[in-house]
Image (spheres, rainbow, N blue to C red):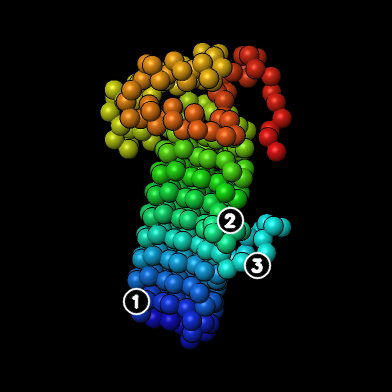
Amino acid sequence: MIHPTAIIDPKAEIDPTVEVGPYTVIDGGVKIGPHCVIGPHVYITGQTSIGAYNQFHAGCVIGDAPQDLKYKGYPTKVIIGDYNIFREHVTVHRATDPEGATIIGSHNFFMQHSHVAHNCHIGNNVIIAGGALLAGHVIVQDRAFISGNCLVHQFARVGTLAMMQGGSAISKDLPPFTIATGGNEICGLNIVGLRRAGFTPEERLELKRLYRLLFRQGLNMSTALEQARAQFTSAPARTMIDFIASSKRGVCTDVSVRRRGQLPETKEEE
């Protein structure tokens, strides 16, 4: 059902099962799959492709131009999977470059006033709470939880099953399974998340030992990774090791390191 006050470009491709609320605007170039529910005052634009069973609550803006001075008006993309929920006034911007796309997987939950900037890649089963802001080119892996009013710097990565405490800010990569607190710091493993995700006691114990080696032994990261590769072989451990080894921005450090005074506080990367 499409409300009579909705404005829909004839070139938009909308499945007949889609519900569109009052005063919503959908531009040409938009594709919307079956059984989506689009609330009032929603704006969907750009080359935006939306899968099935997605919900868009009042005031969402999906596919608008990126907030990037390099953007030259290209018809860039947003690609959204299935079963996502976008609550009130969520914004998702399309990519900056013609070949790029802002990509959102499936079964994600975006709470009110959260923002996904251009060229972000969001995995599956991610929760982004109210007021959280993701800058351009951020990668958020599966089952991560970003709490309210968190900030993620451009090009940073949030690993699988990682969690950010409310109001945290990172400009470095947040390793899988860890909890971010404050600015560019972590305070341990997301044990509750690991348990809920079905990790065995043995896997959780190995991750605890790996965490201690990587973040609490006072080793430089190259040495710690070398030792970790020799000692830990489980799939979860390799996930953390490979994530850290592939980091281009560096990774967040354990909060106890600064408190012990082993490392001076440094300026964040630009």
Name the secondary structure under disc 1: loop
Which quadrant of the rendered structure holds the N terminus? Answer: bottom left
Residue type highlighted by circle 2: His
Residue of label 1:
17
Secondary structure beneath label 3: loop
Residue 56 locus on image (x, y percent): 46, 65
80 relative to 23, above or below: above
Instruction: Give the residue at the far front of this rendering.
Output: 99
The outermost residue toward the bottom is 4
Q: Are marks 2 and 3 in contact (CB under 8 Å)?
A: no
Q: Choose the circle earlier in sequence order: 2 or 1.
A: 1
**Crowding at mark 2 (Cα within 10 Å: few <14, some 14-19, many 20+):** many
Residue drawn where x is 36% and y is 33% of the image: 194
The nearer-to-camera label among 1 and 3 is 3
Give the residue type at disc 3.
Gly
The circle drawn on residue 73 is: 3
Which quadrant would the C terminus be assigned to in this image? top right
Mark 3: few/some/many CA within 10 Å (<14, 14-19, 20+): few
Q: Is residue 262 above or below residue 149?
A: above
Marks 1 and 3, how far apart at CA: 32 Å
Q: Point out the frontmost of discs 2 and 3.
A: 3
- What SS does tag 2 mark? loop
Which numbered disc, 2 or 1, marks the residue closer to the eye?
Answer: 2
Question: Disc 2 marks which residue?
Answer: 118
Q: Which residue type does callout 1 highlight?
A: Thr
In this orientation, which residue lies closer to the viewer: 30 or 206?
A: 30
